Image: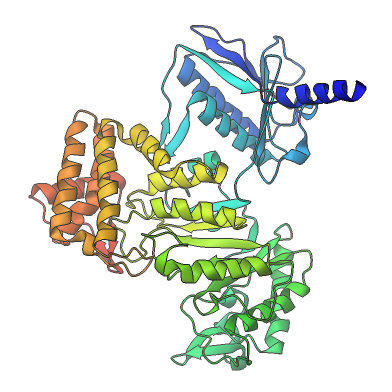
Amino acid sequence: MQRILTLCIFILLSVSDSFSNPIFLWKKNNSPYSIVLAKNATDSELKAAEIFQKYFKKKSDLSIPIIYEGSEKGKANLYIGLTNFAKSQIQFNKLQNEGYFIGLNGENIIIAGKTVRGTVNGIFGFLRKYLGVEMLSRDFVYCIPEVSKNIDLVRSNYINPSFQSVDIFNAQSYSDDYTFWGGINHLFKNGFDSDWGIFGHSFFKIIPPEKYFKSHPDFFLLKNGKPSQLNLDNEFLVKEVISNLKILMKAKPSKKLWMVGQEDDGSFNDLKIANGTNTTDNLILFINKIAKAFPEKIIGTLSFQQTQKAPLKVKPLSNVLVCFAPIDAIYNIPIFSGYNTRFSKELLKWKTLTNNLMVWEYVANYTDSMLPYPSFTVIGQNLRYYHKNGVSRLYLEGLNLTEEVFSELYTYLFLRQYWDITINVNATIKEFCEKYYGKSSVYVMQYIEKLNTNVNNSNGILRFYDTKKDYLNSNFLNDYDRTLENAALSVKDSPLFLARVNKLRSQVDFQLLKGNIKQGDSRSNRFLQTMREQGVSSVKSNSKNIKINY
């Protein structure tokens, strides 16, 4: 009987965590809530609390105060950060990386992470899920006022990201506001405190040819007579890499991750490859020697081009991180389908060798910023595949250019997946379009669907550097133009929505104009006005910068 009673109590306690309680945040002209911060709250926590306060007022037309723990008066408070009250309610071992807790005790709401960044993530997570307030672009926060608001909260809810970290390289994500709202771990943003000491193609950052080539030509492999890659077989080079990394690490002692990554488009052709091995064996043997010298650090390297294939004999050490970068993949089919299976098969081989896997995904066409490029639907599928197969970190490379079309959409989509990999990709795209494009969203969705259909039906290829453009023939372009004309007409009385549609149209306009932009005709005028509004003075087409003359 005692065992049955104990079991019943345990079940009740467990289930109570999932019970939701209706909480009234405000009714008409009244809210009982104050925002309560810990006495030692950081500047970032205060900034996020002030943003919460700002959008609470925009939603409710009510100002709620920010106070510090110990000065509470009412029974309904919103505790932000590591207050003593929050510490008594949270099981911190359930929080991973920069995850957060949202919970309820009586009428008191708690939002906190075990790190400052986790708390900030929690504030913006609460705004999105419970108040419907979310950043859709670097200069637009979606926020619709409501007369009253009640929400359903469970007693304890632990929200952890799907991946250990994510970076989305584009002009949206790299803005200061989006960085703060999105919880993004940037790798190339000036002034951002990244986890990495060095990232990317870093061989020549660690061993600069201008310093070493004359005195140590044997440190390098050549291509067309010039240094192309490091000579992975040179034992003296290993010692010099270790020596230089020690200097770099001393300057950034808090950084745990250090990339020793091959150069872009270099050549390992002159390496001596032992029987039964491949180029990647040489690379991992080289990286292991470096990683062994830094057992407290994580040494990253790239599975890229000639080292895309997993090694045949050498296994990475436990403190080696492999960044899988399938630059030759195509992005109109998933990474696990058709032509791309040559890459996914290698990723699965890497999975058997290491638990430290990162993926460098290519979101945009790097040679042409004015190319309609709907890769985000497929990459949304890829991210689920990567999560399923143990990938812990993501670097998603778009274009850090204001004119990049769809950057707002895919930034939103990928960040939603970062926090919940189970979301429906197509439904999330539709949700974004309805909020960002208003009444024109039905036509924007038609445009996206037509792009995707025509890419595949015309045997097109979406690739980072080499896109097959059959989906942009004159018939298709004219059809896209008519669809976007309907989109523009549906929001002609809204300058905000019309400007967003015209940004979409700018790529189709550019393709139809074929670079022949002349002031005077309506299409050229619209294109030039859109570029002027965005502050764009040149665009990239076929790897060339084309100046825009307003």
Of residues 487 and 454, the one nearer the viewer is 454
Tell me where residue 348 appears, x and y as whole percent: 58, 66
Q: In the figure, 549 relative to 215: above or below?
A: above
Please indicate, yes or no, whether residue 241 appears anywhere in the rendered image. yes
Tell me where residue 155 appears, x and y as whole percent: 69, 23
Residue at 17 percent across and 55 percent down: it is 476
Q: Residue furthest top?
A: 29
Judged left or right of residue 536, residue 110 is right
Name the colour scheme.
rainbow
Judged left or right of residue 135, residue 90 is right
Of residues 208 and 13, the one nearer the viewer is 13
Q: In the figure, 314 relative to 214: above or below?
A: above
Q: In the figure, 269 relative to 476: above or below?
A: below
Tell me where residue 81 appears, x and y as whole percent: 70, 31
- Quarter occupied by the N terminus: top right
Q: In the figure, 24 relative to 378: above or below?
A: above
Q: Quadrant of residue 363?
A: bottom left
Q: Quadrant of residue 315?
A: bottom right
Please indicate, yes or no, whether residue 169 appears anywhere in the rendered image. no
Q: Residue furthest right?
A: 2
Residue at 34 percent across and 63 percent down: it is 462
Judged left or right of residue 207, residue 490 is left
Across the whole image, how many numbered discs are drawn on residues?
0
Residue at 65 percent across and 56 percent down: it is 195
Judged left or right of residue 155, residue 190 is left
Tell me where residue 247 appears, x and y as whole percent: 72, 71
Residue at 70 percent across and 59 percent down: it is 255
Q: Residue furthest front?
A: 1
Q: Quadrant of residue 549?
A: bottom left
